[in-house]
Image (spheres, grey):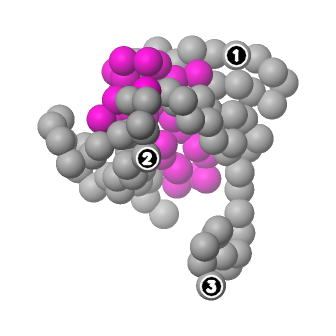
């Protein structure tokens, strides 16, 4: 499996362009707490999850499974573990691992 980035932001159709080959996800963000390209999430060939703040205006915070809080430094990838909480703007996501044959929310 080749590493592939998912870029999350409030609007991914505006400059700057996302990294080549990245899948882009635009979140509904009425409070405009996200940058256009806020954060990149990469699942590496070894299955590890790497998160990189893309120089966002409001930053990205990682809360580990032990409760340790880390403000990500822009453009410096950080490996995250399953169960960690990623806070981007007014949004938060928990890193989970699902089996490839398990449907995600909304899939039939």
Where in the figure is residue 72, as x and y percent of width and height? 52, 18
Q: What x and y, as percent, mark residue 11?
A: 29, 43
Residue 85 horizontal/vertical position (percent): 69, 34
Residue at point 70% right, 25% down?
A: 63
Residue 79 visible, this angle: no
Q: Is residue 38 left or right of residue 13?
A: right
Query: Which residue occupies the foreground of this view, 100 or 1?
Result: 100
Classed neighbour count for the residue bearing mark 1: other residues with Cα under 10 Å, few (<14), some (14–19), many (≥20): few
Image quarter in which the C terminus is found: bottom right
Residue at 60% x, 73% y: name it. Answer: 106
Q: CA distance from mark 1 to mark 2?
A: 23 Å
Q: Is residue 26 visible?
A: yes
Tag shown at residue 27: 2
**From the viewer's perspective, is the residue at label 1 or at label 3 nearer?**
3
Q: Which mark is residue 69?
A: 1
Is residue 72 found inside the magenta-colored segment of the image? no
Element class at badge 1: strand
Q: Residue at x 43, y 46 (%)?
A: 28
The spot of residue 73 in percent (x, y) is: 46, 15
Closer to the chain start, of discs 1 and 3, is: 1
Residues shaded magenta: 33-61
């Amino acid at each position: 499996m080749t590493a592939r980035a998912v870029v999350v932001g409030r609007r991914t159709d505006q400059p700057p362009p996302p990294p080549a080959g990245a899948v882009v996800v635009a979140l509904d963000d009425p409070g405009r707490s996200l940058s256009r390209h806020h954060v990149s999430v990469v699942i590496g060939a070894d299955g590890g999850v790497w998160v990189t703040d893309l120089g966002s205006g409001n930053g990205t915070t990682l809360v580990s499974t032990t409760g340790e809080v880390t403000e990500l430094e822009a453009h410096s990838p950080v490996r995250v573990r399953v169960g960690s909480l990623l806070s981007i703007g007014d949004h938060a996501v928990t890193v989970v691992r699902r089996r490839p044959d398990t449907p995600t929310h909304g899939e039939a």
